[in-house]
Amino acid sequence: MLTYILRRILFMVPVTLAISLVAFIIIQLPPGDFITALTAQMAENNETLDPETLAALRDRYGFDQPMIVQYWKWITGIVFRGDFGQSFEWSRPVADLIWDRLGLTLIVSFATLVFVWVLAFPIGIYSAVRQYSWGDYIATFFGFIGLAVPNFLLALVLMYLSSRYLGASVGGLFSAEYVNADWSWGRVVDLLNHLWVPVIVLGTGGTAALIRIMRANLLDELKKPYVELARARGLSETRLLLKYPVRVALNPFISTLGWILPTLVSGAVVTAIVLSLPTSGPLLLNALFAQDMYLAGGFILLLSILTLIGTLVSDLLLAWLDPRIRYE
Amino acid sequence: MTHHPRSSWTSVPLRVAACGVALAFAMGASAWAQPYSEAPMLAEQVAAGTLPPVDERLPDDPLVEVPLESVGTYGGTWRQALRGGSDNLIERTVGYTRLARWNREWTDVIPDVAESFTVNDDATEFTFQLREGHRWSDGEPFTSADILFWYNDVLMNEALTPEVPSWLQSGGEPVMVEANGDHEVTFRFAEPNALFLSNMATVRGAAILAASPRHYLEQFHADYNDQADAMAQEAGSADWVQHFTTRVEYPHSRWRDADRPSLDAWVLTEPYDGSGQVVAERNPYYHKVDPEGQQLPYIDYVTFDVMESRQSIVLMAINGELDFQNRHIETADARPLIVQNQEQGNYDLWIAQPAWSNAMMINLNQTHKDPVLREIFSDRDFRVGLSHAINRDELNQIIYAGVAPPYQAAPRPGTELYDEEMATQYIEHDPALANEYLDQVVPERDQDGFRLRPDGERLSFAVNVLNSRQFQIDALELVRGYWADVGIEMFVRPLERSLSISLRQANDHDANVWIGGGGYDRLGLLDPKWYFPFEWQSSYAGAWGIWAQNPNDPNAEEPDETVLRALNLYRQVQATPDLEGQLDLMRQILEITEEQFYVIGTNMEPDRVGIVNADLRNVPDAMPNTYFYMTPGPAAAEQFYYVN
């Protein structure tokens, strides 16, 4: 097992490098460069920059060099000096920018994850066990609504309602007085007061999907002979349910756990933009729009590494959970 | 041509102005010492001994700013919202400080940081008097040596400024700057540079003071600090040049650094670095007082929430979370919400007068790379025919809710350059007349009724439009129908902005639409790109515009005789010291523009609205809305104040 893990980790190195190269090229595929994007953004607002300024910027950032040279500088900086370069748009080191956003991003993502799982598992199990009951119909009804309503729309509606009727400030994760404050009890409470909107918005779709998957999986399992056998052996209904069919029905969740890791960092970009969350999603999207390639590249590199790690972790978890697929 | 601040405020109530003048005379420069007063938050610091008294902080002869309506009281926060990471609202509000700036009415340039300025008769020498005792926001003296640092060590340093911006050049030579003593600087040009002061009042002028605080910037400069490169690398920059420029440069990056001393009314305490709200607090050394000797600004703090979408900024506005703003909330789709929720949000409206005349100009590329299209687009009759085919009244009703009357790309009514004939030529919707004109250029049609090019193919072209401007996409769809009625096949092509710009810069577009086309007099003088091919954005003749900007560009093409004549006239504008002379030359340029009919205008750009907290005072009811005016900078936010 240990050699297996080691081999997987070793294999991740060339894969990461390959991803970084592809990412770097894709980021630069759109016409123009950061300067073009900047010009375009300003032109859209009927603003202009002097051509001399633009030429100076282009020269300073080395956009005139061939792409492979730029890539080489970037990747060697990361590998040998841990230097992810500087964001053109923000004039700050990329690592600082990403790091700044990471904390709150993880808080929002974990809260959402917990919300989804806490809600979806009991409901999913219930709708499977009590199939076609009133409770199942209600859960199914709301589940489909949750699946069908786009997140950004739900975000806009909740934002409008909460600002209209609750007088809450719009968007963000903090009230004005706590935005730049240091951490304190008041700030935590303020965060919790704001957190529910993004958690509900981000969680509804996931909850609904999870309920449906759980229900479908469990329904398959419940009809299998081993359930019958366990019941015949006189196992209590709860113990029987949780120990065998639910455990098997968990398989798809564990095997997709690897995908959660990257979405923890970059998930829900559109929602984050609508709600103006200070998370990493909007930063990544803007970096791509602005062709701020070191920032975008840094993000994509981080995301791909997280995906690789996540896949490994979920493979290991799956092996631990389900003896049938253990690697001998 | 000498300016003194008070003489330029023509619109203030006479009584208040007279009172300010009387006070100034009665006290004399040094006798002001007694009545100066300051904000409570600064008085506390003075009492605690952490700040020198107000008399020592103010220049010997501060600028007495006469308020728009009334003398105010201290306190409060001006809340605004930014969008994303590269918004220039801070530059327009907190950062609107220059040696000389626009007056409110956008009719003149008035002293700001400079106490006064003089211009010689041929506009080659501009001398600025600085204020004795003027200090940076950290308390260090501000003198001519600071300006010289900008000139010698930033502008003339080839690493920092590879090419001197054109507004600081004349006759191909960069400006010369000399100090005469500690409090006088002279800008000397090789040839007349009549628009120098106007340019300084736009976004360009801020570059000088941003790069002037030598006592702070020297540490980042390799000529002054051997360790500058090492310091830069430690901070994550590639070299000292990058490290230095990100501190002083426009766009945006100069607001990433909260340590840079400034002469603005407010100074940053939380920078615009993507990590949270941007905060600025009053500059204790600000150089202006009101007629009663109260040091400005009245408002204590300025905050900018960094939002990611326009919608959330609109929601903030109607929720009463913004105090004075038009940026991001002025779009046509937001207007009904903004107007309806005045009571809930406790705000009033002010008019943001669009500086451009046209909500949608159609630019057919007369320098198209396809010679057949080029010839057709270049034919004036073709454009006149297309213009007559457009039903502008219907566009006005359907797209603009009836507030955008038909108009060509011409100066706005009420300006010096306004010309009714130019504004209304070929504006009637008359398909029969349109067909007559078009028949002279492309008479043949195919079996579907569409007109054929001389080479027998169907005449067909795409009009590029930004995908973010839904109203233009909708309007173009209607235009497509009008043109199909007269046998012209046009496609509407919505594009992402970077792609759209790349195509234009490479002269690779058939046609595009844009907001623009004439406007205010000052705008025409500073930015004539919709009057004749002047830069790449003049997309009705892309290759010529590119040539006017840079003849060596691979996509540049030498323009025809007429355009060269217009360019030449504009060079004369740049060399003509007096405004009347400049406007006379502009009229000659406009004759060419009217005759050439480069651009097909549709409807007049309607007024937009901004919001102002109902408790905020000294705010104008209306102001021009453009980057060249730096809206709302010249409204002088330092004299805004809250009642209650």
Image (cartoon, coloured by chain):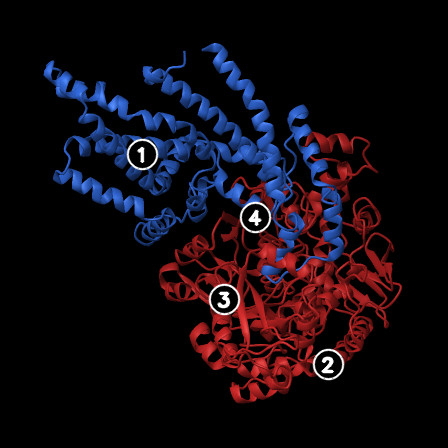
Residues B628 and B431: in front is: B431
Give the amino acid type for the residue marked by disc 3 in the picture. Ile
Question: Mark 4 belongs to which amino acid?
Answer: Phe
B25 vs A234, left or right, is right
Q: Colour of chain A?
A: blue
For the residues carrying marks 3 and 1, which lies nearer the camera in this image? 3
- Quarter location, residue B117: bottom right
Q: Chain of mark 1?
A: A
Query: Tag 1: Cα neighbours inside 10 Å, few (<14), some, or many (≥20)?
Result: many
Instruction: Quickly name the residue at label 1.
Output: A116
Pointers 2 and 1 within a single chain: no
Q: Identity of the amino acid at label 1? A: Val
Based on the displayed image, in which of its 4 quarters is residue B355 positioned? bottom right
Q: Which residue in the protein does label 3 denote?
A: B473
Crowd around label 2: few <14 · some 14–19 · many ≥20 (10 Å): some
Label 4 lies in what chain? A
Horizontally, residue A128 falls left or right of residue B522, namely left
Query: Which dot marks residue A75?
Result: none
Instruction: Answer above or below: position of B403 versus A155.
Output: below
Which residue is drawn at the image coordinates 42% and 31% (left, top)?
Answer: A259
Give the Cα distance between marks 2 and 1.
67 Å
The answer to the question of whether label 2 and label 4 lie on touching residues, with beta carbons closer than 8 A, is: no
The chain displayed red equals: B
Looking at the rendered structure, the kind of residue marked 2 is: Ile
Where is B609 relative to B281, above or below? below
Q: Whole-percent x and y of residue B583? A: 73, 79
The residues bearing labels 4 and 3 have C-alpha atoms spaced at a distance of: 21 Å
- Looking at the rendered structure, the secondary structure element under dot 2 is helix
Residue B290: image location, x then y, percent: 61, 61
Element assignment for label 4? helix
Residue under pointer 4 = A289
Of discs 4 and 3, which sits in the foreground? 3
